[in-house]
Image (tube, rainbow, N blue to C red):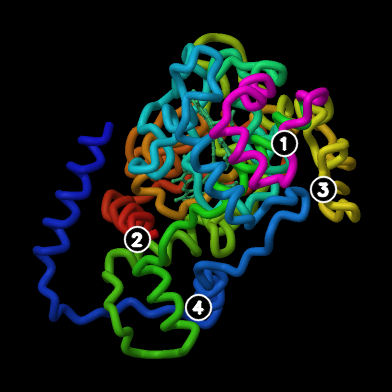
Amino acid sequence: MRLAVNGLLTSLLCVSAAIPTFAADNVTFSDDERTSIISHGPWPPKVSLDPSNRVSGNKSAIAFGRELFRSRFLSASRQHSCITCHKPNAAYADGLALSSGVTKVDRNTISLANLRLNRWYGWDGGSDNLWAQSIRPILDARELNATPALIAKRLRNDPPFSRGYQSSFKTSPNAHDDEQVLVNVGKALAAYQETVVTPRTIFDDFRDALARKETKQAKPYPETAKRGLKIFIGKGKCGLCHQGPNFTNGEFDNAGVRYFKPSGGIDKGRFGGIQKLKKSPYTLLGRFNDDPKNSLGVATRHVARSHQSWGQFRVPSLRNVLRTAPYMHDGSLAILKDVVQHYSTLNEERLHLDGGGLLRRLDLTDIEIDELVAFLETL
Ligand code: HEC
Ligand code: HEC
């Protein structure tokens, strides 16, 4: 998979090297197009601390969370850790179609970055906050396979981890409330993960130059990428779902990917995510939310399953997307060109839309497909 991506990159580099650098750049954008492009920035955006997590932004908790993230301490067998699947040198993903802990799971590992911008977490939005999403793999039998009692016991009895806990929460692990100890582990993990932000790219330089109405950019943006960008905001309608600076509207949709699980059965997507959310003790509506005003909990109270939420998945961010292959919730598309081809030859019948669907088969030419890929690679 990785080789395929590298191969593609190399061939694209060769193509761009073949284009003479003095070629006149004749891609121009209308005022409406300019407005759309500017809406995909600025980057990095300003983010606030998480009011539901009292250690969000806390230096000791970030250091403690980093230790926990890398340690096998959180897995029942002491054989796995978060970095089994979220490898820091692989964009905090694992490059596999389907990830594997104790056993194989049904979904593709989500690359961890820019997490403060999410409204919902997981492909199905099964969590409404980052600390709960961080607890999920600890308890999942296929991933780290632990229990609240096991994690609390280990923390109480392990002096270095106990000290990390103490310096983060100004109290030692509670002797009677296992769930509280587990949630605080999730909160330290969240504080650490919030610090992972993708860097600015040449797209951001181009976007800022447009916003400043500069005709000559300090750093040139390739003409093929500009053509791809035109398709992205234009006839591709990609920007309708992949909106804003993080290239996602943060909600759920159906992009025509199969929802039969590779292991058999059906992945209910958002429908199942809402079921999980309603049952979980770890949401913004529960006792572990540190925000007395609970400003964000309203959405959790009102979210409801509908026929439409069957087979919907979260619209993923496209930041850093070149590095997060393979793609889609089931990792079924290996490289970016496959994704663009998927949209180009989309089987509209598979979308089971209740009217109002935004996606249509695009029938792009080979050149347009390459241009759209070239644009995505600049993110
Ligand atoms: C066995 C592989 C595996 C392990 C181990 C694992 N994860 Fe994940 N992670 C995944 C998969 C797969 C998803 C997507 C889950 C889904 O949507 O069903 C995911 C999703 C996430 C997300 C959601 C990101 C987003 O944008 O919504 C976070 C946060 C996360 N993991 C944190 C962690 C932490 C913290 C640990 C360690 C305690 C961990 N993961 C351990 C595979 C793993
Ligand atoms: C109707 C909303 C919608 C539109 C329009 C849309 N997408 Fe998507 N996109 C999604 C959803 C939802 C997913 C995840 C689907 C899944 O996993 O089942 C996705 C996934 C992707 C992915 C995979 C990212 C990853 O990390 O796995 C890429 C790349 C992508 N879209 C690019 C595009 C491009 C390019 C266009 C325009 C041609 C486009 N999208 C149009 C909703 C949309």
Point out the frontmost of discs 2 and 4.
2
The 10 Å Cα crowd at callout 3, few under 14, some 14 to 19, many 20 or more, is some
User: What is the span of residues highlighted in magenta in the rendered image?
Assistant: 151-178
Kindly indicate whether the residue at mark 4 contacts the one at mark 1 (C-beta within 8 angstroms): no
The 10 Å Cα crowd at callout 4, few under 14, some 14 to 19, many 20 or more, is some
In the rendered image, residue 321, in percent from the top left (x then y), is placed at 40, 49
Kindly report the distance in space between the C-alpha atoms of the residues bearing marks 4 and 3. 41 Å
Kindly report the distance in space between the C-alpha atoms of the residues bearing marks 2 and 3. 38 Å
Kindly indicate whether the residue at mark 4 contacts the one at mark 2 (C-beta within 8 angstroms): no
Quadrant position of the C terminus in the picture: bottom left
Residue type indicated by callout 2: Thr
In the rendered image, residue 287, in percent from the top left (x then y), is placed at 87, 37
Residue at x-position 44% and y-position 57%: 198
Is residue 12 rendered magenta in the image? no
Q: Earlier in the sequence, mark 1 or mark 2?
A: 1
Q: Earlier in the sequence, mark 1 or mark 4?
A: 4
Residue type indicated by callout 3: Asp
Kindly report the distance in space between the C-alpha atoms of the residues bearing marks 1 and 2. 46 Å
Q: Which is more toward the observer, 166 or 102?
A: 166
Which residue has dot 4 on it? 34
Kindly report the distance in space between the C-alpha atoms of the residues bearing marks 1 and 4. 54 Å
Residue 290 got which mark? 3
Callout 1 secondary element = loop
The 10 Å Cα crowd at callout 2, few under 14, some 14 to 19, many 20 or more, is some
In the rendered image, residue 342, in percent from the top left (x then y), is placed at 42, 38
Callout 2 secondary element = loop
Which residue has dot 2 on it? 378
Callout 3 secondary element = loop
